[in-house]
Image: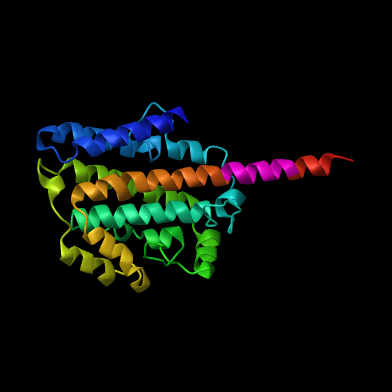
Amino acid sequence: MKQRRQWNENHKRLKEIILKTEEHSKAVQLFLNQHSLLHSSSISQMVHETLEDKLMKNLDETTFRQFPVPNPDTKNSIAWHLWHIARIEDMTMNLLVADEQQVLYSANWLEKMNISFTHSGNDMPEEDIAILSSRIDIHSLLAYRAAVGIQTQKVISSLKPGQFKIQVDQNRITRLFDEKAVLPNSRWLAEYWSKKNIAGLMLMPATRHIFLHLNKCVRIKEKLHKQTKKLILMKSVP
């Protein structure tokens, strides 16, 4: 909890300096630190436990795949949340910011993850969420997410002072639909991104959005584990 409070404070600091050209180097370093805490410590050799590390510790497959879940703020599985944040980060950083190929298409990730969904997951039918939750390969999903995280750090580190102010190019918004990264009924999402500059994409899709979903995942895990322990205890009582 203390680490998460510190993350929030640092995010506020990042928001304050990200558009200041003279603070560019500090903003990049702060972004990289914030971003690293949302991925496995293996991608940045961090000494401290990251939020993903905390989530994956003692996370069993049943808990990972369960859909729907009983939490009040979400009924989607942990599997779905991890896939969703990976897809959002991949398309915003590589397509909208860098205008490059998405990581998803760089190494047969769809085949490795055993799924066919290429979109963000927004407005996804429940039957598709159930399919994804039951079929997705856990290790490949985590590997894909790590590959996305590594690429994000390369993309942001390559940007020059002043580039954080650049608005999202509308041709790149069109690519979201051409590459089926955003569903037609989720046009609102593309319109939301179209109003952002690069700083806005860094502050939400690449950091805050991930933070919020990982926190949801931790709460799902804790609640399901409590339910399991309670059932075991009830069965043990004669």
Residues drawn in magenta: 221-230
Principal secondary structure, stretch drawn in magenta: helix
Question: In this orientation, does residue 181 appear?
Answer: no
Q: Answer whether residue 226 is magenta in the image.
A: yes
For the image, the number of numbered tags is: 0
Looking at the rendered image, the quarter that the C terminus falls into is top right
Q: Answer whether residue 227 is magenta in the image.
A: yes
Residue at 26 percent of width and 71 percent of height: 178
Image x and y of residue 164, in percent: 15, 46
Query: Which residue is situated farthest in the right direction here?
Result: 238
Q: Report which quarter residue 2 is drawn in.
A: top left
Whether residue 235 is situated above or below residue 77 in the rendered picture? above
Relative side of 93 to 229, left or right: left
Question: In this orientation, does residue 195 appear?
Answer: yes
Residue at 45 percent of width and 67 percent of height: 124
Image x and y of residue 203, in percent: 28, 45
Image x and y of residue 37, in percent: 37, 36
Image x and y of residue 45, in percent: 35, 31
**How are the colours assigned in the image?**
rainbow
Residue at 17 percent of width and 65 percent of height: 170
Residue at 37 percent of width and 61 percent of height: 120
Q: Report which quarter residue 237 is drawn in.
A: top right
Whether residue 180 is situated above or below residue 211 in the rendered picture? below
